[in-house]
C-alpha cells in the first residue's frame, strides 16, 4: 500500500512538472513568433505537443493508479 502512495506522489509531481513545462514551451514559442522566427516557433510548438502528450499520459496513469488504490483498499476504510 505504501508503494501505491509513493507512486501517486510521483505521478502528481510529474503532472505539475509537465504542465509547467508546457506553459514555458508555449511561451517560448510565442516569443519566437513575435520576433519573426516562424520556423523556430513551429519546431517549439511540436515540442509543446510532445510535452502535452506526456502530461495527458501522466494524467491517465494517475487516474488508473487511483482506481487501483481504491480497489486494493480494505472495505472498512473510508
Image (cartoon, rainbow, N blue to C red):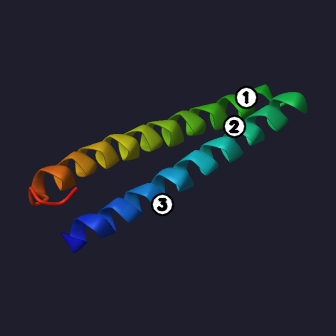
Is residue 59 visible to the viewer in this orientation of the structure? yes
Measure the alpha-carbon separation of dots 2 and 3: 20 Å
Q: Neighbour class for label 1 at 10 Å: few (<14), some, many (≥20)? A: few
The residue tagged 3 is 13
Measure the alpha-carbon separation of dots 3 and 1: 32 Å
Q: Neighbour class for label 3 at 10 Å: few (<14), some, many (≥20)? A: few
Q: Earlier in the sequence, mark 2 or mark 1?
A: 2
For image coordinates 29% across by 66% down, the residue present is 5
Above or below residue 42? Residue 57 is: below
For image coordinates 48% across by 60% down, the residue present is 13
Q: Of tags 2 and 3, which is closer to the observer?
A: 3
For image coordinates 63% across by 32% down, the residue present is 45
Q: Earlier in the sequence, mark 2 or mark 3?
A: 3
Quarter the N terminus occupies: bottom left
Q: Position of residue 53 (x, y in %)?
A: 44, 37
Residue 37 is left or right of residue 11, and the answer is right
Q: Quadrant of residue 10?
A: bottom left
Q: Of tags 3 and 1, which is closer to the observer?
A: 3
The residue tagged 2 is 26
For image coordinates 44% across by 43% down, the residue present is 54
Is residue 36 visible to the viewer in this orientation of the structure? no
Secondary element under disc 2, as helix, strand or loop, is helix
The residue tagged 1 is 39
Q: Are marks 2 and 3 in contact (CB under 8 Å)?
A: no
Amino acid at each position: 500500500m505504501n508503494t501505491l502512495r509513493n507512486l501517486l506522489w510521483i505521478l502528481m509531481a510529474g503532472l505539475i512538472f509537465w504542465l509547467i513545462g508546457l506553459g514555458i514551451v508555449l511561451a517560448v514559442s510565442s516569443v519566437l513568433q513575435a520576433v519573426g522566427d516562424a520556423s523556430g516557433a513551429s519546431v517549439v510548438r511540436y515540442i509543446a505537443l510532445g510535452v502535452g502528450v506526456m502530461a495527458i499520459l501522466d494524467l491517465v496513469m494517475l487516474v488508473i493508479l487511483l482506481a487501483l488504490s481504491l480497489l486494493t483498499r480494505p472495505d472498512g476504510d473510508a
